[in-house]
Each structure stands twice: as structure tokens, then as C-alpha cells.
Amino acid sequence: MSLYWLIGLGLVFLLVSALWLVVPALYGVPWVPTREARIRRALQLAKLQPGEVFYDLGAGDGRVLLMAAKEFGAQAVGIEIGPVQWALGWLRILISGGRHGARMRCGNFYRADLTEADVVFVYLTSSQTSRLAKKLEQELRPGARVVSIAADFPDWQPSQVDREQVIFLYQK
């Protein structure tokens, strides 16, 4: 390998790393994965049913989408603003066969239409849930559920709480 090739590879690595960290952080939503058991518990708490429309806001690498689609039979839609995370999630869905009813969208979930959602999954900070609350109140239909890991919606009353795993369930 030539020195120029190694330098180029190093620059690509730095660029991808910067995109991985910087883009989501610019929007105040850092990428922090969580354990599969915690995700599964959140989906169980939401009583996600086959055929329901499930949105993961800030879908990261697509793990939540695939679990919602494969294990629960949901039509899972992930919205991710980080280009590297979006590409990783898209590839993960593609490699899994892509036939499970999961799909990724690259974009800002504050601009997405969530009116068809039966269940919305979020793993955000408290400031982000406060900001998102009004959008969800306006767009979600009666009976829709919101499941949040780690941060509650301060002005909402949860219908269920898993205190051990810090998961909040809300129903409209």
C-alpha cells in the first residue's frame, strides 16, 4: 500500500467518524444505542401488534425497526438524520432480506408526517421529548401509543412505567 492510499483511507475514516458524531449532535440527538432486551421490553409494553404502523424517531442503526418488524410483525418506519447511521440501518435491513416490513428514511423526524402511526418509539433527551410533544399531540390519532426510553414527556401522564428499565408508555 502506498502512503497516499493510507492517508486517503485515514481521511475517509475521519470524515465518516465526524459525520457519525457531528450530524446527530447538531440536532441535539446524539447516537446512543441501547440493549436488545430493553428494546424488546419497550415494544412489549406498547403492545405492538402485527400490521400496526410503527415509527422509530432517530432510528440509528435500524435494530429497533428490525425487531419491531420481525418479532412483532409491524410495518416499521425509521427516520434518521445522521447519514452514516441511516446508511448502516438501510444496509442492516437490506442484509436481513428487507422483506420484514422495515424501511429507513433519511431526514429530520420533526418534519415527518406521523399521522399514520399506531406506535411511536423514541430514545431521546428530556429537552427533545418536550420539543416533540406538541408535534405528537397534533399528529397522532386517538389510541396511538408513544413509548419512550430514558426520558419522559414532562407534561404528559404515562399510562405505564417500567421503572427498572426506565421506559414510559403514553396513550393518546
Image (cartoon, helix red, strand yellow):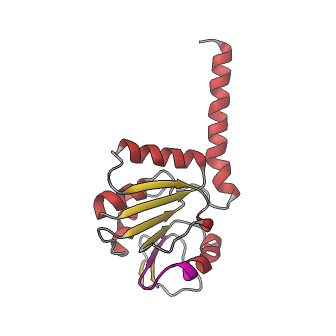
In terms of depth relative to the viewer, which is nearer, 98 or 57? 98
- Direction from residue 118 to residue 86 in the image, left or right: right
Quick check: can you spot residue 76? yes
- Residue plotted at (45% across, 43% down): 91
Q: In the shown orientation, is residue 172 left or right of residue 23?
A: left
Quarter assignment of residue 52: bottom left
Q: Position of residue 85 (x, y in %)?
A: 54, 48
Is residue 72 within the magenta segment? no
Residue at 30 percent across and 63 percent down: it is: 73
Residue 122: x and y in percent read 51, 67
51 is higher (above) or lower (below) than 83: below
Height in image: 5 above or below 168? above
Q: Is residue 143 left or right of residue 128?
A: left
For the N terminus, give its image quadrant: top right
Q: Residue at x 66, y 35 (%)?
A: 14
In the displayed structure, 86 sits above or below 161; it is above
Q: Which residues are magenta?
A: 136-148
- Residue 153 visible to an observer of this rendering: no
Label tally: 0
Residue extending farthest to the top is 2
Where is 14 relative to 145, above or below?
above
Residue 50 at what x, y percent from top left? 29, 68
Residue 103 picture location, percent across and down: 43, 54
Which residue is located at x 37 percent, y 75 percent?
Answer: 46
Q: In the image as oriented, which residue stretches furthest toward the right?
A: 26
Q: Say if the magenta span includes residue 147.
A: yes
